[in-house]
Image (spheres, helix red, strand yellow):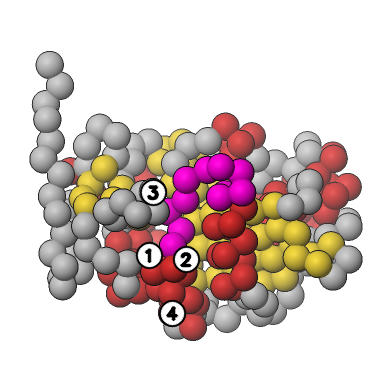
Amino acid sequence: MATKILIPKLHPHEHTFPDPRCASEEGLLAWGGDLNSDRLLRAYEQGIFPWFNEGDPVLWWSPDPRLILYPNAIKISKSLAKSLKHFEICYDTCFETVMRQCWQTRLQKGQNSWISEALIEAFCDLHVKGFAHSVETFFEGALVGGLYGLHLGGMFCGESMFSIRRDASKAALVGLCQKIDALGGDFIDCQLPTDHLKSLGAIEISRETFLGFLHETVNKKTIQTWNTPVSLEPLEALKL
């Protein structure tokens, strides 16, 4: 018989979390608290992230296994390589818009979303402070895809992406890999395993291994300015 684990409730005013190793079999670590930027920063520094349905209590996760992507390991198919030639990749030009597009795109597809006004407000604050960043994909001057997340030391925590044109979100991921590689970063935390991200080169590792990587990378200096353009050309060599 499986052992039941009591999921602790977070203190409303203290930004402390249980040990990530104490999560349930499903990866649920704690619930409650708010989504202010300081709490979010403390969470991600420990490999913990919020994931819940809008309107429900905030749920905090530390899954096992964990999905990560090394920037130079992204797989670029021949068709994606062709698509990249038609896109323009930018960074931090419209952070809040990217977040809202990720939110609205999920809702339009009938999917639940953990993105809320409170989360947008907190991440916009982290963006102003130089921790949260976005990657934008433009086609003929129009925003057609993008992603956002949190940059801590040598790790980028990917949060969500959207696409309204074929390959636009993949192009944003390629742009993210190129940026993290150019900044000397170590890996992208993709959080939960998905077949889609695995097909692009992401791999599963154990929570214990992830926490070891996290300990080594999170205290590195975080590069807070991302507005320098980065060419996608060096990644052409990685295509399948």
Q: Nearer the viewer, mark 2 or mark 4?
A: 4
Q: Mark 3 points at which residue?
A: 53
Sequence order check, earlier mark of 3 and 4? 3
Q: Are marks 3 and 4 in contact (CB under 8 Å)?
A: no
Secondary element under disc 2, as helix, strand or loop, is strand
Q: Mark 4 points at which residue?
A: 125
Q: Nearer the viewer, mark 1 or mark 3?
A: 3
Q: Nearer the viewer, mark 4 or mark 1?
A: 4
Q: Which mark is residue 218?
A: 1
Secondary element under disc 1, as helix, strand or loop, is loop
Q: Quadrant location of residue 133?
A: bottom right
Q: Are marks 1 and 2 in contact (CB under 8 Å)?
A: no
Q: Quadrant location of residue 47?
A: bottom left
Secondary element under disc 3, as helix, strand or loop, is loop
Q: What residue type is labelled 2?
A: Leu
Q: Name the residue under label 2.
A: 150
Residue 103 at x, y = what percent?
A: 54, 57
Q: In this view, does 78 lie to the left or right of 189?
A: right
State yes or no: residue 108 in magenta. Answer: yes
Q: Which residue is drawn at 27% across and 66% down?
A: 34
Q: Is residue 121 visible?
A: yes
Q: Which amino acid does label 1 sit on?
A: Val
